[in-house]
Structures are given as structure tokens and as C-alpha cells.
Amino acid sequence: MNDLYRHIQSLLDADPAFGAGGRLLRNSVLEAARRLDARLLQLLLADSRARQYFFRPVQDITVFDVNRFTRFIASSRFLPGSLTAFKNKIGLTVNEELIAENNSVVLAFPYKDAVLPGGQTRENDRHNELFFHETLDAERIDRLFEPKALIRWTRLFRENDEKPQRLSYNDNFLIKGNNLITLHSLKAVYAGKIKLIYIDPPYNTGKDSFGYNDGFSHSTWLTFMKNRLEVARTLLRGDGVIFISIDINEQAYLKVLCDEIFGRANFVGEIIWETATDNNATQISMEHEYVLCYARNKTALPKWQRPSEKAQIIINRYRALKKTFGADTDKIEKELRKWINNVKKSNRHDLSGVSHYCYVDDKGVFYPGNSANTRPGGYDFDIIHPTTKKVCRKPANGYRWPETTFWRAAEKGDVLWGVDETTVPRIKKRIETATELLKGYYYEDNRKSTRALTGLMGKKVFENPKSVNLLKKIISFASDENDIILDFFAGSGSTAQAVLELNAESGGRRSFILCEQMDYIEDVTLARIRRVLGRESLVYMELAPGARKLVDKIAAATTLPRLRKLADEVLAGPFLYYGAAHKEEEILSLLRGESDPENLRQMLLALLDQNMLYIPRDEMADGDWALTDEDKKLTDQFYRLQAHGTE
């Protein structure tokens, strides 16, 4: 292979368009390849070794494999020691290639679910969870990302289920199937339409977590995330955003990967989520996770602010005191201040940023804002005291607001006057106008989320579900009341619960789309959502399995005789990888000679055509798939959905 690198380098060096004084112009070569430059193609075609490696015949046509060529040229093994490849490209690498130029795809499928039976929590109580991470080269992918047929359509309500008659663009959807393939199917309907995506992907910690295989190799994990984030970006609206939970293990790499996919300028920020106390740290106690946020186009985002939840706590207390003390504002103010001080001491509520709202008049709760400008050069005008009729004392730097603002406040009774003109008048800021921002720090012990889910479900069904409170905060800040929220690592369904609770509290109509491939989707995800649906409904469907049925059979097989019997089914079926065609007898002999069950399992999986794991939509009419007329009808209806209507 090294000889081939030297050969191609010499070939390109000899052409002045691609070499200068013995120095290869690598960026010029890459650019020429991307635009299919005739001069470059003629040069490569004329060389037998280059033609054999970078071109392939398709019937009577010779096709240039531009992806293979650019990966070859960008590889660090080509021109070793050269920095030219990184002149304009500094970023993550996978297998010595820039990940931005790596077109491989990682499919992650479970052999079986690592579901914890009720009450089990210890590591040694867990089932062994086996995944295969099939990494496909770009040249093996043809039909993988076509829209897929959908089956098992069910509309769920809190108390009952029914077959959906009509689908709506803003229905709540839960789709079972591999999330990468599901995302590409969703693209046919929702490209450029999703306002907010939240995901909690595998953290790649090297430990088996509940449900997902949380231990990829680093390079496989990066490719796995790249595949999914690239298509996720196409689903976002122009003002859409994505939030991604991660921990310290991959946070830095995920940040750089997102910089490449979304653009560094579209990094919105990150939330540090303090989740628990770590009393067993070896060096530094890790007690937090991260939530990264990127925008499709940061310049299109509005300012994120909302009415203050903390202020509402004080408003509620004021209303209770008003019922007790009526119109006695002095008594209400005294009791309100006493209550605020007690709350601050006991930490019963977090009132930071709003505890200064402790003044009361006949209109409600307020605090008198500072009238003084922060530096010299403020507004200078006379304010006449309503009682003494004399000019009030002015701040040294002038007023911070113009005269018109002051007199508008005075007309509404929103000025706090002094006893006489010796006191600077102040404008009252009503507590109802208090707003909050989405802060970069959030505290909530995640054990609270586990307890809440356990209480909802009646038993412990999931390890470390995400905080519904944090998700509600994120969604309420970064989306509006009719937007669509997507989560393609649905897990236990925390995102669905957050959306449903927000709708119930505000009367909004946000909808959600969730994707999950694990079998606990029915016993955990669906069961949880049903408990919090309220008056809303959920449409459930699954990607129609093709070769995936064989994957499940191979996964379930535990003995050599059973696996060898499945070998006959794989080789005789319609899902054999095309590269194995016409070699069935030779392959079968090899399979029957394998004595290790796990090796045989891996060999059988490798023989399946991953492009046909699920049935393409355009093959629904094929009777071999045995799809019902209802499934075909609803699948067609789904792909015809449009905003503001059903079809």
C-alpha cells in the first residue's frame, strides 16, 4: 500500500497543475477531485494502477470513486509528515482520516435488551448486553436510507387504544426501529420543520448502562454520532436548536464534532448540570454532566426569556396573605418579608434573583428600581414632588430612564415617592414583569428523577432517567407552544412527559416525535407516556422489518446447531449481501466448520445485506413482505403529511 501512495504522489507531482517544484499541491488535488476536473480524471485514467484503484466499471461505463480518492489523498499515510492536509482543515480524525471526510456509517443494534427486572440495581444483577456495531463503508450503502414502510399502527389514549383513521402533522409519534434509519425516513416529512431536538445518547463510558450499549470504541462512537447529527441538522428549522446530554468522557470530542457539523458560529452554549455527590473520587470529584446546545442558524434565534418561576412562588405567597389580611398592605408586606427571609434560611425554595421583590402596595408586590445611571451622563430633568411641589433630589449621574418613561409610570401609580423632595423618586417594578434566562448551571440530584419515575410506574423500571424538570425548562425557553420536539434516543420517555406536562400547564400544543429501538419501548416508554397523556393521544408505529427478522433470530440463537440451521436460511433468503452471491456452497462449508458460537453469530450477521434491514416504502406492494392494506395506507398517509393539515 505504501508503494501505491508513492506511485500516486509521483504521478500527480509530474503535472504542474497538481505539483510545484517537487511539492504536491494537495488542496488543489482535493478541490479538483470534488469538481470532477477533466484534467485530473484523464491523468488518473491513463495510469493503470490509478484506474484500477479509483475507478470501477458499471455495465459499459467507468465510474470515478471520488470518495475513495479524496480519503486516499487526505490520509496521513499519503505525504507523511506533510501539514498541507490540515492547512484549512483542523478537526477530529477517525482511523487517520478527518471525520468530516469519513463517509462510513455505524449501525448499532442490540442482540438483546439489558432490561433490569423490577428492583434490581446492582451491576452484577444486570443481564449481559451484547450489541453489534456494524460499520458500513459508503460503497456498501445504496438503499439503507430510503423511507421505510411502517407497521403496527396504534393510536393510544390514557385508557384505551384504537387503529388510527387519520394522521395529523402535529400528532405525537413514537417510532420503534434503528434511529439512524428512522431519522432518514422522518426526513421525507419533517426536513426543516423541527424546532427543538433533545437527545441523551450513549456516553461511551465503557460501562454497560440500562438499555444502551454504553461502550463503543472512541472512533466508532464518533462515527456513530456524526451519522446521526448530520441528518438531525437537516431536520431542524432555520431557527431550530439541538440540545445534547453528555458527560466528561466525550464532551470535548462531541463539542468539536458539533463545531464541524453545525458550524462553530452556531454554538449557543452549554448547561452544566450538577447531578449528584461523588464521595469516591480518586482525584477530582465528578458531580456534573453537560448539555451542549447548537443552532441551525444562531443569528435566527430570538432572545430566550420567560416569566420567572421563582417570582411565581412569591406571588402565590402574597395571594395567600391577601386572603388573610385583606387590604392591610403594611401587614401583608411585613409578613411577606418575614416569609422570604425564612425561606432563604431554610433553602425550602430557591428565591435567588427575586427575593428583593418584598414591597407591597394596593396593586401587589414590587421592588423600587434604582433610579441612578451607572455612569455620568444620565438623563437630566426636574421631577416635582406631588406633596411639597418642589424639585426632587437627583442622582449624581443623572436618571437611568428618560422623562417620558417616568411620567408613564407615575400615571399608572408605579412611582415610589419619598416623604418629601429630599428623596430620589423610584419606579416600581412589578413582580409579574420579572423574567428569567436559561442559565448555564442547573442543579438537580438525578436520584430525584429515578424516584419520580419509580413512583409513576409503581416499580423501578429504568436507571438514571433524565430530569423532566430540566427538559421542561429547556423546551419552554427554546420553543414556542405549537412547535415540534424530537428525541431520537427516547429511552424511558422523559422528553414526552416534559412536553405533555408543559402543554397541560400552559394550554400549549407542542407535539413530540420519539424514536427508540429497544424492546423496553412497550413496557417502559409506552407505559410511561400513557400515564401522563392526559387528554392527548400518541400514535405508535414500527419500521417494517426485513433482514431485521433474521438479525433477531440470530441474536436469540444460543447453540451451534441452531446457528448452523440459520446459516441455511441466510444463504437461501433474499437478504444475502450481494458480495456473497454465487458463493453459497463455499460459504456454507466455512460456516459449518466454525465451532465457536459467537464467531458463527458474527459471520452470519456479516452476510446480511444491511440495506434491507427494514422494508423500503416503495416495495410495500411486494406480496412477499405480507404488509396489510391498513399498514400500507397509513404509511402512505404518513409520508404525505404536511404542516397545518393532515395530507
Image (tube, rainbow, N blue to C red):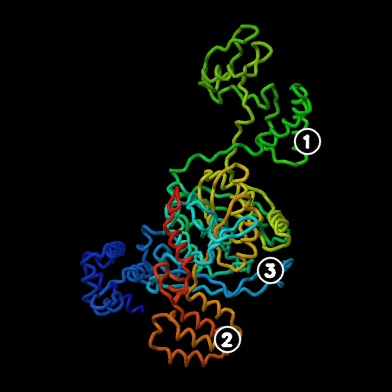
Q: Secondary structure at mark 3?
A: loop
| Amino acid identity at mark 3 | Leu
For the N terminus, which image quadrant?
Answer: bottom left
Q: Residue at x 61, y 12 (%)?
A: 392
Q: Nearer the viewer, residue 172 or 564?
A: 172
Residue position marked by numbered label 2 in the rendering? 597
Few, some or many C-alpha atoms within 10 Å of disc 2 (few <14, some 14-19, many ≥20)?
some
Residue position marked by numbered label 1 in the rendering? 342
Q: Nearer the viewer, residue 231 or 645?
A: 645
For the C terminus, which image quadrant?
Answer: bottom left
Q: Nearer the viewer, residue 361 or 19?
A: 361
Few, some or many C-alpha atoms within 10 Å of disc 3 (few <14, some 14-19, many ≥20)?
some
Q: Earlier in the sequence, mark 2 or mark 3?
A: 3
Q: Secondary structure at mark 2?
A: helix
User: Disc 1 versus disc 2: distance between alpha carbons?
Assistant: 67 Å
| Amino acid identity at mark 1 | Asn
- Based on the displayed image, in which of its 4 quarters is residue 309 positioned? top right
| Amino acid identity at mark 2 | Pro
User: Disc 1 versus disc 3: distance between alpha carbons?
Assistant: 43 Å
Q: Residue at x 62, y 16 (%)?
A: 424
| Relative to 505, residue 1 above or below | below
Disc 2 or disc 3, which is closer to the eye? Answer: 3
Q: Secondary structure at mark 1?
A: helix
Q: Earlier in the sequence, mark 1 or mark 3?
A: 3
Residue 118 makes an appearance in the image: yes
